[in-house]
Image (spheres, helix red, strand yellow):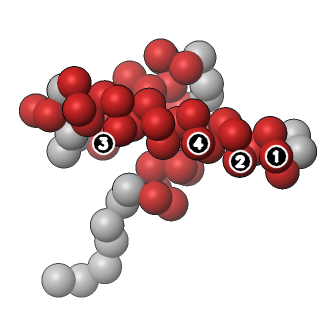
């Protein structure tokens, strides 16, 4: 996969996350549901979707 193809796929995943959050606000705080729904909708491996979620949406660290 070229860098451009990877960037486009990641952007599709991010766009789908935003779409799902807008339509299903009650599920927005459930990462498992978001990842599964996005992978199913885009027909992409859940592992790739989870990677994008962890890189861009997961808030980690001690509070």
Task: List the residue tagged with mark 4.
Answer: 11
Q: Are marks 4 and 2 in contact (CB under 8 Å)?
A: yes
- Circle 1 residues within 10 Å: few <14, some 14–19, many ≥20: few
Task: Identify the residue position indicated by label 2 in the image.
Answer: 7
Q: CA distance from mark 3 to mark 4?
A: 18 Å
CA separation, marks 2 and 1? 5 Å
**Earlier-in-chain disc, 4 versus 1:** 1
Label located before the other in sequence (3 or 2): 2
Between the C-alphas of marks 3 and 2, the distance is 21 Å
Q: Are marks 3 and 1 in contact (CB under 8 Å)?
A: no
Closer to viewer: mark 3 or mark 2:
2
Q: Looking at the rendering, which quadrant does residue 33 occupy?
A: top left
SS of the residue under disc 3: helix
Residue ID for mark 1: 4
Whole-number angstrom distance, CA of label 4 to CA of label 2: 6 Å
* Mark 3 or mark 4, earlier in chain: 4
Q: Residue at x 35, y 38 (%)?
A: 18
């Amino acid at each position: 996969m070229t860098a451009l193809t990877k960037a486009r796929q990641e952007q599709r995943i991010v766009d789908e996350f935003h779409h799902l959050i807008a339509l299903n606000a009650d599920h927005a705080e459930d990462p498992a549901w978001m990842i599964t729904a996005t992978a199913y909708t885009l027909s992409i491996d859940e592992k790739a979707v989870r990677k994008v979620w962890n890189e861009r949406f997961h808030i980690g660290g001690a509070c």
